[in-house]
Image: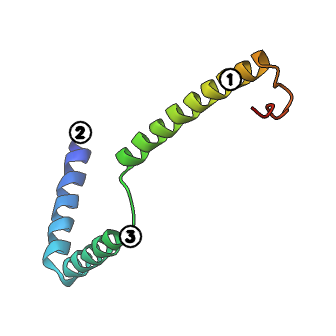
Amino acid sequence: MVANRILDEISGKLSQVFADSPAGEVEKNVRAALQSAFARLDLVTREEFDVQQQVLLRTREKLERLEAVVAGLEKQAGLGGGQTPPAP
């Protein structure tokens, strides 16, 4: 426990030293440049990606169900096996 507290204190002091030094300014500038670059890119958040992934999964499942229904209707109409329907 004492070792963890000492490491935390050292880490805090080092962070403060870097924040007050030119290295802290460099870090802030690099961070700002990266944020600006990412803002220009067409990126989505992980949450948005996961939502769209679920939408795609549901759409695929629905498509498979509809394909099965169409295949059943084609079979009932005697159109199975890739035959074209008779002209009306």
Q: Position of residue 20 (x, y in %)?
A: 13, 76
Question: Cα distance, mark 3 to mark 2?
Answer: 45 Å
Q: Is residue 30 left or right of residue 17?
A: right
Q: Position of residue 41 (x, y in %)?
A: 38, 70
Question: Cα distance, mark 1 to mark 2?
Answer: 63 Å
- The residue tagged with tag 3: helix, strand or loop? loop
Q: Position of residue 39 (x, y in %)?
A: 30, 69
- The residue tagged with tag 2: helix, strand or loop? loop
Q: Which residue is mark 3?
A: 41
Tag 1: amino acid: Ala
Which badge, 3 or 1, is on the more N-terminal residue?
3
Q: Nearer the viewer, residue 54 or 8?
A: 54
Q: Residue furthest bottom?
A: 22
Q: Nearer the viewer, residue 67 or 30?
A: 67
Q: Is residue 40 left or right of residue 77?
A: left
Circle 1 or circle 2, nearest the eye: 1
Q: Quadrant of the N terminus?
A: top left
- The residue tagged with tag 1: helix, strand or loop? helix
Circle 3 or circle 2, nearest the eye: 3
Say if 14 sits above or below 85 in the image.
Answer: below
Which badge, 1 or 2, is on the more N-terminal residue?
2
Mark 2 neighbour density, 10 Å: few (under 14) some (14–19) many (20 or more): few
Circle 3 or circle 1, nearest the eye: 1
Q: Which residue is mark 1?
A: 68
**CB within 8 Å, label 3 to label 2:** no
